Image: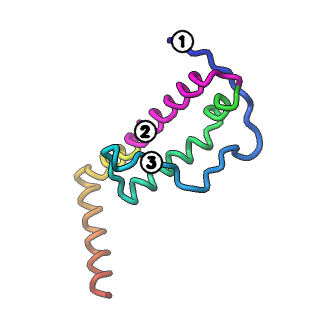
Amino acid sequence: MRHLITDQKVTGSNPVGHTKRPESPSAGAGLLLSEKDKVDLQDIYEGMAEDEDLLAVLLGDNTPDNKKYKFDQAVDQRLINFVNRKFSLYEKLTKPNINAALKRQWFAQMLREVMEG
């Protein structure tokens, strides 16, 4: 399926009002989210709400199907970027010398904090 998408220039403030946390799939859909998950989802949503390319397509002269296609692509890309960022940090922190230093520093800090009350 070929998608012809036009853009509309987005200027000024963000046209998406996103003061509330975005709705997430319910537990009835088989998804249980921790508070951290909800924060991560809100960060992803807010990033999308500030994505000028996505907003240009949503505000442009496009069919609903084309708008949905662009939106779906943006969600998938942000989810991939999220995983890659987390995995990149994991890779850094599991290098033997870094891992050992991290554990030493955190152990000393936590022990100090616990002992000081």
Residue 108 colored magenta? no
Q: Residue at x 65, y 35 (%)?
A: 55
- The answer to whether residue 77 is magenta is yes
Up-down relation of residue 42 to residue 79 (above or below)? below
Crowd band around label 3 with a 10 angstrom C-alpha radius: few (<14), some (14–19), many (20+): few
Q: Which residue position holds label 3? A: 24
Mark 1–mark 2 Cα distance, whole angstroms, equals: 23 Å
Question: Does residue 114 lie above or below 83 as drawn?
Answer: below
Q: Residue furthest bottom?
A: 116
Left or right of residue 94, residue 53 in this image: right
Main SS of the magenta segment?
helix
Residue at the image position 34 percent from the left and 47 percent from the top: 28
Q: Which mark is residue 107?
A: none
Q: Going by the picture, which residue comes out furthest to the top?
A: 1
Residue 6 falls in image quadrant: top right
Q: Nearer the viewer, mark 1 or mark 2?
A: 1
Task: Check disc 1 and report its element: helix, strand or loop.
Answer: loop
Closer to the camera in the image, 22 or 100: 22
**What amino acid type is highlighted by mark number 2?**
Leu
* x and y, in percent, of residue 7 in the image: 69, 25
